[in-house]
Amino acid sequence: MAGIGFSLKKLFTKKGLFSLCRAYGYAGLICAGPMILGVILLVSVAFLSQLAGMSRHDRELLNCMLTYCLLASLTTTSIFNMTATRFVSDMLYEEKPERIIPSLYGSTTILLTGGCLVWAVFLHFSGVLTVYKLLCLWFYAILIVVWMEMNYLTALKDYKVLVRDFAISLACGLLLALLMVLFRHVTITTLFLCVILAYGLLMALYYRQLLKYFPRSEGSRFSFLRWLEKYRSLAFTGIFVNLGLFAHLVIMYFGPLQVQVEGLFYGAPMHDVPALCAFFSILITTINFVTSVEVRFYPQYRNYYSLFNDNGSIRDIEQAEDEMLSVLRQELAFNAHKQLITTLLFIVIGSLVLELLPLGFNDTSMGIYRLLCAGYGLYAISNTIMLILLYYEDYTGALLSTFAFAAVSIAGTVLQILYGQINFYGLGFLIGSLAFYLVSWIRLEWYTRRLPYYLLCKGAIVENKKLGILSRLCNYLERKEGAVHEK
């Protein structure tokens, strides 16, 4: 985000409508580009499969397998997402960039070992053909590597290259899928292989960028485990965000809207399609967070903290704190207002557009769509507040707010499929997002009133040298690693 912020500052300093549009376009491309391109790939594959005359069952099975792999891989990598970002930031600050690539190898190895084992057990009992099981396992493994690479690539400043690599790889996958249609070789296997090729190429391109930025590799592959132990609240925060965001989709597979495609692969089209359409309503907040909060808030934030490091006077510190919090409140308010307007536009105009499209929307799915638009809007605002808590290193507050989000969203959705009416499906996620907003906002207000205390008195006077489980595991793995190198 720092690299994006620096580039945007240059664009925002230039006057004129064109420069303003260019700045917002740049932020949108960086923040939302990969997600939009990924959705384009999946939608295009579905369209090509229908164009080639694949049966409805085969199309739904392909869609289910791809969706399951995406959700499973995102949930798996959420364990290390935030901790890995913190590790990379610390290594860059300590001027030890050579330790970054080894930690990527270590974290990816752990996730692939544990994740593929659990995923293979599920696939074994999934009830689909063996070739489909192998394709799902292969795709899942590639996705884990891609998501972890994207976490590490936050250290890069050449963000345009990242989006370009994403576009190139997905274009290659689509081109190959189109060739399969032209030569009439369209099956679940061939289209699945096209998607695997696209993300496999993306994995290679991202790895090339990492090696270009971090050419030297030294140190243990498992030293990041100490960060996971030290900042375990970050790990749980990442897990809870993903659970709150995706669990309600999976729970719907076991409710009245479920459609059993084959074996353990289920879907809920009346809920899934509205959820996908509503999810796009959060893009405005994602972009605005970078263009507004990051660019305008960060200079005030940096000035405030630099006064503590540079022996600033108490009067200067208090003035800088007032200015920083004033800018923060303004930007969060603008962010919320823009999201509110976007949500209303998606509900009013989006409903009219979706009725015209051949997506099979009826009164039930339209009601779900409107509730989910409101839910995703609240989630976007709450997630912005949670990110500000992380700015201030209030990891406890971020953990509490995301836990409330996940717990209420899951409990509300479960109760809804058991006792609620179908027309109000999505209300559980909406209430979960509301809980996320209330807890994060109250915590931010409470924390910012005590900023000097947490900044000056939060750290331990005497360092705790007691080793936890992960530190001992890290020491053991490092000894094994050293023994292998000696041989």
Image (spheres, rainbow, N blue to C red):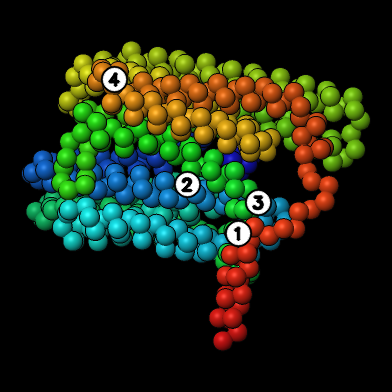
Give x and y (percent) for residue 97: 65, 60
3 or 4: tag closer to the N-terminus: 3
- The numbered mark at residue 420 is 4
Label 2 – label 3 distance at C-alpha: 17 Å
User: Please, what secondary structure does the residue beneath circle 3 have?
Assistant: helix
1 or 4: tag closer to the N-terminus: 4
Question: Which residue shows up at 79% across the image and 53% down it?
Answer: 463
Camera-side residue: 190 or 134? 134
Note whether 363 is above or below 12 in the view shown: above
Label 3 – label 1 distance at C-alpha: 11 Å
Amino acid type for the residue under numbered disc 2: Ser
Give x and y (percent) for residue 85: 58, 49
Amino acid type for the residue under numbered disc 1: Ile
For the residues carrying marks 3 and 4, which lies nearer the camera in this image? Answer: 4
Question: Which residue shows up at 51% across the image and 64% down it?
Answer: 105
Give x and y (percent) for residue 409: 42, 28
Provide the residue designation for mark 3.
230
Amino acid type for the residue under numbered disc 4: Gly
2 or 4: tag closer to the N-terminus: 2
Provide the residue designation for mark 2.
78
Camera-side residue: 274 or 284? 274
Question: Which residue shows up at 58% across the image and 26% down it?
Answer: 440
User: Are discs 1 and 4 less than 8 Å apart at CB?
Assistant: no
